[in-house]
Amino acid sequence: MTRLYKYISIFSLLLHLSMSCWGSTNEEHDSNQSPLKIMPFKIGFEFQESSGLCPWAKDDNNIQKQILFSIKSIKNDQKLWHLVIDTNDIEFVTRPFSNDEETDLQQCIDSIISNFDILKKILIEQKQVTFDSWLLLVEQNLSDSNCYLRKKDRYKFVQDQNITLPDNHENFRYAPQVTIQHPLEYTIPLYYSLFGFESSHMLQFNSSLPLKNTFSNYINNCNYRAIQQLAIGYQKKLNGLVFLHALTLVCMTPTDDEDGEALQETEDNLLNYAQVDPKMKLPLMSRRPFSNMFKDLKSDKDYATYFQEVMLDNDGFQDFFEVPKLFNKTNYAEQFFEESGKILDLSFFKNFLTDDFKALFGNAVDRLLSQGIISTTLLRNVKDDFKLNEKSSIQNLFDHYYQLAVTSVASPKHFYRININNNMNTEDLAKDQNQLLQEIDSLYDVLSPPIFLDLKNSMGYFKNDDKIDKDYGEAVIEVRGISNVKEWFLRKCQLDEKLSGIFLKDPGKDLSNQALKLFKFLHNFNNKDNYEDILFGMTHAVKNTKL
Amino acid sequence: MILRCLNLITILVLNIYSSSYGCNMKLLNLEADTYTSRLGSRYPILEENIKNSLIFVTDLNLIGQKYFDPEGFNNLQSIALSKIPTEEFQQFANSCKKLYQYYGQENTLKSSSVYLLFEKVTEKYYKDYKLLQKLNSFKKRNQKIESKIGNTRLIDTFINADKHINAH
């Protein structure tokens, strides 16, 4: 009987929501009278081929992420894509394409497919090929496709190097990412629509939803009118910003506060992904500082008070992930390199750690420091006399990290950095511990990037507002888990649901179709049918969150 | 304390954090992420999918001897199933076992790849599963929280959050 009642309630809710005003929340807009405007957006793609085709590049920091060559369109002389090396992989990176550049995007993706096909063919036949030999064939191929190639200065470092097919290799695989620029008011419906509504991401998403407890209560009581009201709130710029900010905090909060687990996590991340910074924990990563986005809104609200009020009404944020309590134990790290690009041995840092910590975790500490890695877990365990400045200790800074993360969005003050650069002598560093950490004035919040990371870190990287075309919105989001888009999105795009988990991963011919379907989905995103589905999906996700 | 010990024992027994040379770890993780994500949304995983994922072993001579031991695979599977008793994981484990036996000693490149993939997916999905368990007990404890409704002023502020915004 209870179950029957539940189904009747849900059906009834669906019926009511299908007549709702979700999606028509621009106050000046009446959705029944005229079509909704197109969501302005830009989208860029990154395809990292993950077979490790350039093993010689792995520990050479001087060529990492540097543009080696780019491919431009003859038609408008605009760049389509460029090639970089990431760890030991080659990576194709497209420029961002705006909502009216579908044809250019198609040309770009087709060009990536055909030029990677050339490489695959040679590798399968010959096992290896130099960059120069590959590019000779690329240039011939480009002459038929209205594109041309431009080599960059750094290319000379790789021109004679081999691209090598590993033994036993049969298939190629991309680790894809997309970066989407869009107005903040679309944030909540857009990302629920990509990853909803039963995926493992829903636990983090729901725990980042402002006023989630109230929303959940309205759903339980089938209070349609109130649900519609909150749905209007979920399409506000400020609430989109709160959601993104809260999601970053949730994902960076450890589920286990043991130091040993944290050290193990850093070692595992180095081994498995050759990365130790926090971005790999984030399904969505803001490439603009939260403080810059808030500044753009010119809101008269006290951000910190508002954030804490609307997130106090979320039991996932407060009591399940315990973000305000546990964020201070967030674990991430930075890896340092010598000028030559080789890893810098930071073993001297062990002298600054407490004896208790060294006694418990000495071996793990040795391994990390010898790999040039300093993590927040190491910094939280320095001796008491290791001061951040004359007044405060490092422990004190970490104790207040959550509060700083919230207050610094509206009032940025300081950033904290590790003062090691690639031409420093580790013997000198070891002598003067007071020079090792620095407090500097900052115009940005303390998560952009998170404190103690390199200022060039991709979290909150786009600081120069002159380079952001705000006509396409305030948010620039790197969607790191794009392969895991879910069934609703795939059905909406008329793509096979089997692509969930492997979306954009296969470098074959269908890549172009998948990329363009994503583009079209964004282009047509702002329509009433979508919003009705998404609102119903959100109610389902909030009501039935399971992993 | 008991729970912590159990976790530690599980990690030790599953040998979850063993590193493996002769294997492209990035690729292994990329493939394992596919199945962890599919298990999370209860999407069916076909044996054919798993076969197409066995692309990460680069040198058979360098990967650990344990990956050639059928007894070890069976032990891992039993322990994993006792720790993660969900239907979808059981189906995935059965598919892996079938493939491990199918490739057997004739194609050790593929059978050891199945072992590595199953081990990595178990490691990743077990973290998600533990979170699910924590969520279930949390929900039982906190049923009353959801009965609260935010105050009217806050809801009104929330709905009109952009009222005084001047952005475009």
Image (cartoon, coloured by chain):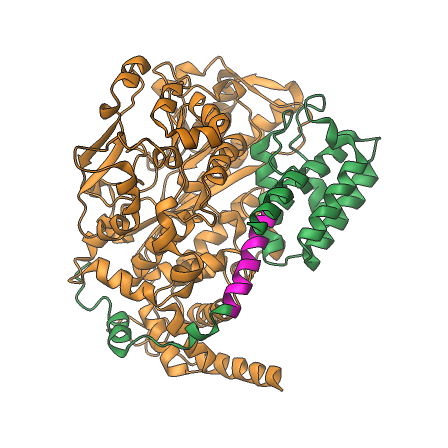
Chain colours: A orange, B green
Left/right of residue A415 with respect to residue A352 in the rendered view? left
For the stretch drawn in magenta, the main secondary structure is helix
Quarter assignment of residue A211: bottom left
Q: Residue at x 58, y 38 (%)?
A: B29
Query: Is residue A65 depicted above or below A535 in this figure?
Result: above
Residue A477 seen in the current view = no
Quadrant containing the C terminus of chain B is bottom left
Whether A419 is drawn above or below A481: the answer is: above
Between A315 and A137, the one lying in front of the other is: A315
Identify the residue at horizontal 70%, vertical 59% (top origin). B87
Q: Is residue A92 above or below residue A232?
A: above
Question: For residue A519: magenta?
Answer: no
Tell me the magenta residue range.
B124-140
Q: What x and y, as percent, mark residue A474?
A: 27, 52
Give percent across and percent down for residue A314: 38, 65
Q: Is residue B139 magenta?
A: yes
Is residue A57 left or right of B29 when viewed as pictured?
left
**Residue A465 x/y as whole percent:** 21, 43
Relative placement, left or right, of B1 versus A61 is: right
Which quadrant would residue A157 be assigned to in this image? Answer: top left
The spot of residue B152 in percent (x, y) is 27, 78
Give the camera-side residue of A355 and A423.
A355
